[in-house]
Amino acid sequence: DVSRKEDRLLTCSSDNFVKIWDLDEGVELQTLQFHDAAVICCALDPRGEWVVTGSTDHTVRLYEIGSETPAVVVGRHDEAVCYIRFSRDGQFIFSAGAEGIVRKWEWSVAYQVATDTTPDHDSAISSIEISVTGRHLLSLDTDGRCIVRLIDWRGNPLASFLLTDTDDPA
């Protein structure tokens, strides 16, 4: 993930490490290891102060950049966490699991709580994106289905529909 200022890059890998890079200098700023298994996905919050990660250990973890405090387990999925995103305003974290569920997490320094689970997919979710306006959450699964959710300003789903390929003979 690249920060909005385009000065930092966040990478994750199967060796359980997350790295923060300075894009202007091309140097590694920090190496983090707080998962017990491969880190599949990672994202920076809109201000570039927090890192959220997802792993094959089924956990979603949150870490404040530069802090000495260990990463906090925000929540868990039943299977590996495949994709992760902050909301446009940084108040929510959306995570997608191999079990086909998108979860929304409301977080603060004081508490973390899962406020929504959406089992709309029959297979692992390969990507989630939030529209520029923050009103639409899209999720794509490994079977090629794309579900679009209209969400309110708090990230709560208002409606959803499945996009289908009209050229598909099935």
Image (spheres, rainbow, N blue to C red):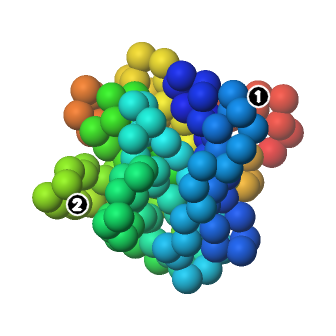
Outermost bottom residue: 36
In the shown orientation, is residue 144 left or right of residue 122?
A: right
Counting from the top left corner in percent of width and height, residue 26 is at 75, 38
Near mark 2 (Cα within 10 A), the count class, few <14, some 14-19 or many ≥20, is some
Q: Compared to 17, does 151 lie above or below?
A: above
Of 3 and 104, the residue lying toward us: 3
Residue positioned 63% across, 68% down in the render: 17
Percent from the top left, x then y, of residue 145? 67, 45
Q: Position of residue 44 (x, y in %)?
A: 49, 42
Residue 19: x, y in percent? 63, 56
Q: CA distance from mark 1 to mark 2?
A: 41 Å
Camera-side residue of 38 and 97? 38
Q: Are marks 1 and 2 in contact (CB under 8 Å)?
A: no
Residue that protrudes farthest toward the top in the picture: 133
The amino acid at mark 1 is: Thr
Question: Who is closer to the viewer here, 97 or 64?
Answer: 64
Quarter of the image for residue 36 reads bottom right
Residue 92 visible in rendering: yes
Say left or right for 36 vs 62: right
The answer to which of 80 and 16 lies nearer the viewer is 16
Q: Quadrant of the N terminus?
A: top right
Helix, strand or loop status at disc 1: loop
**Amino acid under disc 2:** Gln
Q: Helix, strand, or loop for circle 2?
A: strand
Look at mark 1 in the image and give the residue it sits on: 166
Specify whether residue 159 is in view.
Answer: no
The C terminus sits in image quarter: top right
- Residue drawn 20% across the image and 51% down it: 108
For disc 2, the marked residue is: 112
Task: Name the quadrant containing residue 16.
Answer: bottom right
Give the mark, 1 or 2, whose residue is nearer the N terminus.
Answer: 2
How crowded pointer 1 is (Cα within 10 Å; few <14, some 14-19, many 20+) is rated as few
